[in-house]
Image (cartoon, rainbow, N blue to C red):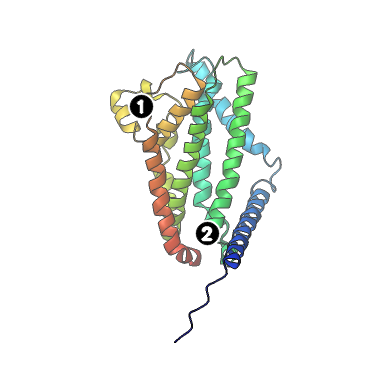
Amino acid sequence: MTAAAPRPDRSSVEKTSYVRRFATTRTIMALLLREMTTRYGRSPGGYVWALLEPIGAIMIFAVGFSLLFNTPPLGSSFILFFATGFLPFNLYQNISVMVARALVFSRPLLFYPAVTWVDAIIARFTLNALTGILVTFILFSGIILATETRTALNLLPIIQSVALALLLGFGVGVLNCALMGLIQVWDLIWSVATRPLFLASGVLFIFEDMPPIAQDILWFNPLVHILGIMRQGLFPLYEPHFISIPYVLFCSLVPMFFGVLLLSRYHRDILNN
């Protein structure tokens, strides 16, 4: 009789698994440091620009609309109103763009066996998510402390809005990462198709102020729901009944699923293009 093959030692299997996890963590940290150096370390001011860009945009909108209208659609502060729209939108936009270009950014490193496409995407998402959360926290804190907003914070909707913006940006970014690698003109197509997204997401208005026909169309934009949740957290009298968190999760998880599916199947072809 043929002798049975010896079973692998459980301790050796666990040790190998631990080593692999540790190697993956080191790889992601190395990619994080590279991203920080490349994006923020080579420009004067570095991380200061991550704060100045949204501050400039919010101030321009606030000053411009204060000259046209007496009061904002919600509350008494134009700055706070536009911050509640611009910051979650900007968070989604940055995450989706950065994740979509993760393979292009890390292409030279992805030919090493120790670095995978998953590492590149996780590293880029982590850095930009942490940066976006920090910028959002600092700007909201500064606006509330520096202006008479008379707001009562509700942290749960604020946290939900930030989390959903990150999740939606990650899902859309992963799918676009695959499509940009497989379809050369997809970056241009997506850029043109989403150009009106800023106006159609409710950054400058609230959903309830739109006519019923426009509401029926805008409801299918998941960012409208995310911005409504954020404003619910900073304007205590605002009750957006149109919000559907399951719909936002659906719009986030479906593209994420297909993006991961395409990348796991075609990532080598994308890198070799």
- In the visual, does 222 lie left or right of 234? left
Going 59% across and 58% down the picture, which residue do you hit?
21
Q: Residues within 10 Å of mark 1 (few under 14, many from 20)?
A: few
Q: Inspect this view and state whether residue 201 appears.
A: no
What amino acid type is highlighted by mark number 1? Phe
Q: Which residue is mark 1?
A: 242
Q: Position of residue 53 (x, y in %)?
A: 60, 35
Depth check, front residue: 67 or 79:
79
Depth check, front residue: 196 or 93:
93
Indicate which disc residue 86 carries: none
Going 61% across and 28% down the picture, which residue do you hit?
139
Count of number-bearing discs: 2
Indicate which disc residue 117 carries: 2
Q: Inspect this view and state whether residue 106 appears.
A: yes
- In the visual, does 179 lie left or right of 18? left
Q: Position of residue 59 (x, y in %)?
A: 58, 25
Q: SS of the residue at dot 2?
A: helix
Q: Quadrant of the N terminus?
A: bottom left
Q: Position of residue 251 (x, y in %)?
A: 38, 42
Of the two numbered discs 2 and 1 on the same chain, state the one appearing first in sequence: 2
Query: Residue placed farthest to the bottom in the image?
Result: 1
What amino acid type is highlighted by mark number 2? Trp
Gap between marks 2 and 1 measured at Cα: 38 Å
Query: Residue placed farthest to the front in the image?
Result: 1
Quadrant in the rendering for residue 237: top left
